[in-house]
């Protein structure tokens, strides 16, 4: 088997006396959709935040393309080509979608004005509209604040931002939790399209049918540890749920 | 951007209502919050003009209003930035006094009645303002102390320091050249220098806020600080710069104040901070951060100024101005709340 793109080994993270991660392992291969599943409190979001540079792990090792790396800040994760769609979406609600897409990465004008920090708003709007169109995010007004948009549209903006800037991996933390049936379908289509572009997607989800629909592999987290890994094609929902609840243990703790 | 453009073109998927269309500029203009406050200002001017045309509508009266508003406008520009980051700066009036005291003392000890002395005074007041502002920013951003407490603390410290330096007695000696030019002089014998300085500050920092990365980051931090941090914006450093800007502008305002009154007016600025905050909020800037414009703050400065002046001219007791401004302030915040609630209910 080829070398994993991203590998976490023995990640430990404590919040005071709460042991969120107790030596968790996690693997992402190149160009796959891997689902990270687990019951509430299993440590899924904590693990993702650790890999995205938002939280610093207390112990453990992260390998990226085989090399040990330190991901202390979101910027370092970004430099590796890792982008995250957070559960809270991390959008600035008072700004428009283009401003959110380019937050922290604004395009400046050319020449002296650019040196003075003047924004090229037209170029950013053009590129943002293009990204939304490519990913099939329909916005009525890309110059209205994100606050005026529906949950699905906000989700679309957050996903577009991550996909636009990621070159290797996109983490999606419960991307469909707040969405209706039709919008959920579109996000799943979007995940497939992202994979077609050669990116890996890590999907954190509670929703088993959804996971079985898009994921190539499934990794199960339970009480802060990885307890099982499955290939979606040769497993069943019962087996995965069994691993989540502790009825079946596949990997030694 | 990665290779998004090579992906297969598909029909817009998350399409909910009618196809996308940019809102035309006039519609955005009509619904913009600073437009309404601008109309209220125009309405006030129309009413006072109708009631007392000859004395209200004259270049000398316009000059009076603008001169009275100039120092407050400079404070309000800095305050606009601070409030957009969801912060507050209560120390501006005290920093104004402190900077004026430092400038006056220094100009007198250097002596002379020439531009060199004046320049030393200007630099000193800007530096004093910068120092207080940077201290505010550092305590807010790095020590994570609430801005309300930090700037309440530095308010007391700056005012106390100004009293210590002067022994509580106003410094009444100021180079006459400064008073004759910046203080009371006019360009083409029409527009006071103070007004030109204040509007230059408003225009420059209005443009910076609306059109540059610095301004964009200010909005992003005020709108969602955590998101800004995750997007790689150096939030702490930016907050320090914003408070430093507010301090520098308070220093400039202090220098303008000394030039205008030829004395340090230590006791006369106890409510400057509240006036500046009121002007900014009346101008449509949200106390919750993320929303606001310098243009709105300009309107917000001139509404109280026009009210004050108009009441005097039409013979209403000027004390009513305070009552009216208070009502406008509450109304402005109520509108902001309504707008936010209507958005959150979606």
Image: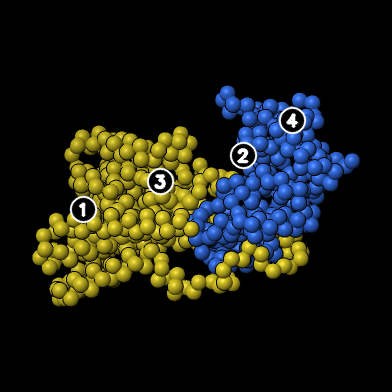
Chain colours: A blue, B yellow
**Chain ID for label 3?**
B
Horizontal side of residue B85 vs A96, given as left or right = left
Q: Would you say the residues marked 3 and 1 are in contact, meaning their CB atoms lie under 8 Å apart? A: no
Residue at (73, 68) in percent of width and height: B9
Q: Which residue is mark 1?
A: B261
Image quadrant in which you'd find residue B149: top left
Q: Secondary structure at mark 3?
A: loop
* Nearer to us: label 2 or label 3: 2
| Residue B138: quadrant of the picture | top left
Q: Please give left or right for residue A6 compared with residue B263 in the image.
A: right
* Mark 3 and mark 1: Cα distance apart in space: 31 Å
- Between circles 3 and 1, the one closer to the viewer is 3
Q: Position of residue A161 (x, y in %)?
A: 64, 55
Q: Do tag 2 and tag 4 residues touch (Cβ < 8 Å)?
A: no
Relative depth, front residue between B81 and B46:
B46
The image shows residue B123, relative to residue A22, as above or below, that is below
Disc 4 from disc 1: Cα separation:
82 Å
Q: Nearer the viewer, residue B141 or B281?
A: B281
Residue A247's disc number: 4
Indicate which disc, 3 or 1, sits on the residue closer to the N terminus.
Answer: 3
Q: Chain of mark 2?
A: A
- Kindly indicate whether the residues beneath marks 2 and 4 are on one polypeptide chain: yes
The local secondary structure at tag 2 comes to loop
Label 2 sits on residue = A54
Q: Which mark is residue A95?
A: none
In this orientation, does residue A6 appear? no
């Amino acid at each position: 088997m080829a070398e994993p793109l991203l590998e976490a080994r023995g990640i430990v993270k404590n919040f005071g006396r709460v042991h969120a991660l107790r030596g968790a392992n996690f693997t992402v291969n190149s160009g796959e959709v891997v689902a990270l599943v687990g019951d509430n409190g299993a440590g899924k979001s904590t693990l993702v935040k650790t890999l995205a540079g938002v939280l610093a792990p207390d112990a453990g090792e992260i390998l990226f393309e085989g090399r040990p790396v330190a991901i202390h800040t979101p910027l370092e994760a970004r430099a590796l080509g890792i982008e995250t769609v957070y559960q809270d979406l991390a959008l600035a609600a008072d700004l428009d979608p283009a401003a959110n897409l380019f937050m922290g990465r604004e395009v400046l004008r050319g020449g002296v004005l650019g040196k003075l920090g003047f924004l090229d708003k037209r170029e950013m709007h053009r590129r943002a509209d293009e990204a939304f169109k490519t990913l099939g995010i329909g916005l009525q007004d890309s110059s209205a604040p994100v606050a005026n948009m529906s949950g699905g549209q906000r989700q679309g903006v957050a996903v577009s931002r991550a996909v636009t800037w990621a070159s290797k991996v996109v983490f999606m933390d419960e991307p469909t939790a707040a969405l209706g049936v039709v919008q959920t379908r579109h996000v799943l289509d979007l995940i497939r399209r992202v994979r077609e572009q050669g990116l890996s997607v890590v999907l954190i989800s509670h929703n088993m049918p959804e996971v079985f629909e898009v994921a190539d592999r499934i990794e199960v987290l339970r009480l802060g540890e990885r307890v099982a890994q499955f290939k979606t094609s040769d497993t069943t929902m019962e087996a995965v749920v069994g691993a989540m609840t502790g009825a079946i243990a596949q990997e030694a703790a | 951007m990665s290779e998004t453009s090579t992906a297969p073109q598909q029909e817009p998927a998350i399409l909910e209502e009618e196809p996308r269309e940019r809102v035309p500029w006039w519609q955005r203009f009509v619904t913009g919050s600073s437009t309404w406050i601008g109309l209220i200002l125009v309405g006030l001017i129309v009413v006072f003009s109708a009631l007392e045309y000859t004395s209200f509508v004259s270049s000398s009266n316009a000059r009076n209003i603008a001169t009275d508003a100039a120092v407050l406008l400079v404070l309000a520009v800095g305050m606009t930035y601070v409030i957009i980051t969801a912060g507050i700066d209560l120390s501006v009036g005290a920093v104004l006094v402190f900077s004026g005291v430092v400038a006056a003392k220094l100009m007198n000890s250097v002596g002379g009645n020439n531009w060199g002395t004046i320049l030393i005074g200007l630099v000193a007041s800007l530096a004093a303002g910068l120092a207080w502002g940077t201290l505010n920013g550092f305590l807010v951003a790095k020590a994570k102390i609430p801005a309300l407490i930090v700037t309440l603390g530095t308010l007391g410290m700056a005012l106390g320091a100004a009293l210590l330096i002067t022994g509580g007695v106003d410094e009444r000696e100021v180079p006459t050249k400064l008073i004759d030019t910046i203080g009371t002089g006019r360009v083409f014998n029409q527009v006071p220098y103070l007004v030109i300085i204040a509007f230059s500050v408003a225009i420059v920092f209005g443009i910076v806020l609306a059109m540059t990365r610095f301004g964009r980051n200010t909005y992003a931090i005020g709108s969602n600080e955590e998101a800004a941090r995750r997007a790689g914006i150096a939030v702490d450093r930016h907050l320090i710069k914003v408070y430093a800007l507010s301090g520098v502008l308070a220093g400039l305002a202090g220098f303008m104040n000394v030039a205008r009154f030829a004395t340090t007016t230590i006791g006369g600025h106890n409510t400057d901070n509240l006036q500046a905050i009121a002007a900014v909020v009346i101008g449509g800037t949200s106390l919750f951060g993320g929303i606001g414009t310098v243009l709105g703050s300009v309107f917000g400065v001139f509404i109280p100024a026009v009210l004050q002046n108009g009441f005097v001219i039409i013979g209403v007791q000027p004390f009513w101005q305070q009552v009216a401004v208070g009502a406008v302030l509450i109304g402005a915040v109520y509108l902001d709340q309504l707008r936010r609630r209507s958005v959150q209910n979606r």
